[in-house]
Image (cartoon, rainbow, N blue to C red):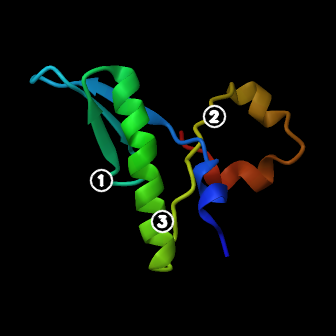
């Protein structure tokens, strides 16, 4: 079973927005609803780490799956065509 420290090591993409009311919102899009706010980008990111820990603790206690981070990789098609294992990756290709 996964533990909280294992899950906290995941590197999720974080989106930071400046809100009309003058605060920052830091959000992990891979986990719907996981967001935090602060008066600066740093404070929003610090709060997001706290919120992420609590959310993961709750998810683990309820035996819910914690989504893994998504990775977007862009490579030129001519480079992809040269890969020896491209058949394994074909299902993940978006054109």
In the image, what residue occupies the spot 27% across and 35% down? Answer: 37
**SS state under label 1:** loop
On the picture, is 17 further left or further right than 89?
left
- Earlier-in-chain disc, 3 versus 2: 3
Can you name the residue that lies furthest to the bottom here? Answer: 63
Q: CA distance from mark 3 to mark 2?
A: 30 Å
Give the answer, above or below, for where 78 lies relative to 80.
Answer: above
Q: Nearer the viewer, mark 1 or mark 3?
A: 3
Number of the label disc, if any, that sits on residue 33 = 1
Q: Please name the residue that numbered disc 3 is placed on.
A: 57
In the rendered image, which residue does mark 2 sit on? Answer: 73
> Local crowd at mark 2 within 10 Å, few (<14), some, or many (≥20)?
few
Nearest the viewer among 45 and 67 is: 45
Q: Which is more N-terminal, label 3 or label 1?
A: 1
Could you classify mark 3 by the number of other residues whose Cα lies within 10 Å: few (under 14), some (14-19), or many (20 or more)? some
Which quadrant holds residue 82? top right
Would you identify the image quadrant in which residue 4 lies? Answer: bottom right
| Percent position of residue 54, x then y | 42, 58
Residue placed at 51% from the left, 60% from the top? 67
- Identify the residue at horizontal 90%, vertical 43% (top origin): 84
Dot placed on the residue nearer the N-terminal end, 2 or 1: 1
Residue 11 visible: yes
Which quarter shows the N terminus? bottom right
């Amino acid at each position: 079973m996964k533990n909280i420290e294992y899950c906290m090591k995941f590197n999720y993409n974080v989106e930071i927005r400046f809100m009309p009311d003058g605060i920052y919102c830091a959000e992990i899009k891979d986990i719907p609803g996981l967001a935090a706010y602060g008066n600066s980008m740093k404070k929003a990111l610090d709060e997001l780490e706290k919120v992420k820990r609590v959310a993961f603790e709750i998810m683990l206690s309820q035996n819910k799956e914690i989504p893994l981070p998504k990775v977007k990789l862009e490579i030129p098609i001519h480079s992809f065509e040269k890969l020896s294992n491209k058949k394994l990756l074909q299902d993940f290709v978006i054109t």
